[in-house]
Image: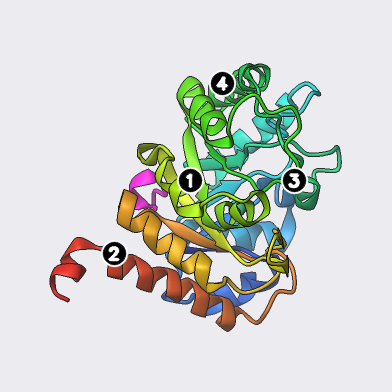
Amino acid sequence: MTTGPASLHGAGLGLRRAFVRALLDTPPAAVDFYEIAPENWIGMGGANARRLRALTERHPFVCHGLSLSLGGPAPLDLELVRAIGDFLDVHDIAVYSEHLSYCSDDGQLYDLLPIPFTEAAIDHVVARIGQVQDLLGRRIAVENVSYYAAPGQEMTELDFIGAVLERADCELLLDVNNIHVNAVNHGYDALDFLRALPGERIRYGHVAGHRVVSPELCIDTHGSAVIDPVWSLLAAAYEHFGVFPTLLERDFDIPPLAQLVEEVEQIALIQRRALPEQRAHG
Ligand SMILES: [Fe+2]
């Protein structure tokens, strides 16, 4: 079975190790594909590795990196990139994405820091994305991130993202929740931002939940259910760009699998509603 780009479609779920056995025994029909962080699985042997292989043989997967630190000041970890390439080959996974941001040495998601929106940062990150794409022999997707401080801005976030995608000739992992979180925290219009992105570069999308601290502050926790404004923004994205594969991220306060599958079903429902033939049939 091939899990190339043509087979990536529909609604997906970020894979949690705790769910692997259940997904092997009774795979939920609603989940069309899964996402994993290669760093969490590279070098793993034994039963866990065999179970993952059984899953990747049966379902399309995408890989979402945590620790490559595309914007970071330290030299790229080329050993890690090669290991990721081997992992993609072993599991026949075509799509690899990373954050358009940088993180501290321990590679924790909640330590992601912003890239200053500057010409120098564009040059830096474009060169590094090019290095990764050369080593992996494919285009990668970079994700629009949530950020809480934007030091030394020379341009808007939109101009920054657009320039990176164009010059690196890479794809976009469109995180709809991150747009909502940034719109609240930085006071811009989420819909205007969404519509200004280069839709032809979208490879796939993310939705997730976040913590609302106040009307002016959201924290991107991936620790609660997706809220209605984010579902609405996802519908608007499909309306504007057409339907693209989209998955649910959940990293903390993990509920039972059935509850997550309900949210994946919600993605699928919004996708069906956005398809032209569905609309034509009312
Ligand atoms: Fe995301």
Classify mark 3: helix, strand or loop. loop
Measure how far apart labels 2 and 1 are at the Cα level: 20 Å
Check disc 3 and report the residue beneath it. Answer: 43
Residue depth check, mark 2 versus mark 4: number of the one nearer the observer: 2
**Image coordinates for residue 237, horizontal then vertical, percent:** 39, 55
For the record, the magenta segment spans: 1-8
Q: Is residue 66 left or right of residue 123?
A: right
Q: Is residue 276 left or right of residue 152?
A: left
Lower position in the chain sequence, tag 3 or tag 4? 3
Per the rendering, the mark at residue 26 is: none
Check disc 4 and report the residue beneath it. Answer: 130
Classify mark 1: helix, strand or loop. helix
Q: Report the number of numbered marks.
A: 4
Q: Is residue 272 left or right of residue 235?
A: left
**Looking at the picture, which amino acid does disc 4 mark?**
Gly
Check disc 1 and report the residue beneath it. Answer: 193
Per the rendering, the mark at residue 274 is: 2
**Image coordinates for residue 182, horizontal then vertical, percent:** 63, 51
Judge whether residue 99 is colored magenta: no
